[in-house]
Image (tube, rainbow, N blue to C red):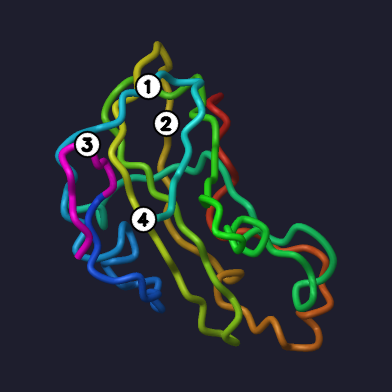
Amino acid sequence: MQDADPWIVQRKWITNNPIFETSNSSLSCNAPSTPARTYIPLTAGQDLTAVYATFDAYTASWFKIGQKGLEEETIETGMWFQKSFSGWDGSPTLWSETVPKGLKAGKYLVRHEIISLHSANKPQFYPECAQVDVGGDGRGGGGIAEYGPESNIDIYDPEISKRTEYVTPGPPVWTGTA
């Protein structure tokens, strides 16, 4: 299990192995998802960056503020964000999204996930969570549920592999407006 210094806001996890089932209770924030000791203070409208180098999140209400997927070409041979995102040269791996200005102030659990599709019909989920304390005068937020069919595809199937679009699982990104 990772060490948790008092300043770390990421919830603890035991392994970096993938989660394969969308019904697995560890999918929300990995396992065991032990709460962190503190929160990151944020103001709605600020950027939030996940750095890759732990409340029962399984029952939480979620909304999406960003997503990345297929960037160019086809599902089989194209460039996926996961490849361009990874610090293959040893540099830090960072992913930034802007917290919507319309988000209501309060304590939130930010969930960041990578879905790997390189095994046919067996998606690999890599979720992580951090605790943030959002400030501002927004009034909104929302909830999401299911993953949907695009999380369980065979990228080597001839009909799928030549597609030039991939629908990221979940609802559309919430921009902070109604």
Determine which residue is flagged by label 3.
Answer: 7
Q: CA gap, disc 2 to disc 3?
A: 27 Å
Residue 130 lies, in percent from the top left, at 31, 44
Asked if disc 2 and disc 1 are in contact, CB closer than 8 Å, the reply is yes
Mark before the other along the chain sequence, 1 or 4: 1
Whether the magenta-drawn stretch holds residue 2 is answered as yes
Relative vertical location of residue 64 with respect to residue 164 in this rendering, above or below: above
Q: Is residue 77 left or right of residue 95?
A: right
The residue that disc 2 covers is 141
Going by the numbered disc 3, the residue's amino acid type is Trp
Quadrant of the rendered structure where residue 12 is?
Answer: bottom left
The residue shown at (42%, 65%) is: 126
Q: Which residue was labeled with disc 1?
A: 104
Q: Secondary structure at mark 1?
A: loop
Which range is magenta? Answer: 1-10
Between disc 4 and disc 2, the foreground one is 4
Q: Is 70 displayed left or right of 124 in the figure?
A: right
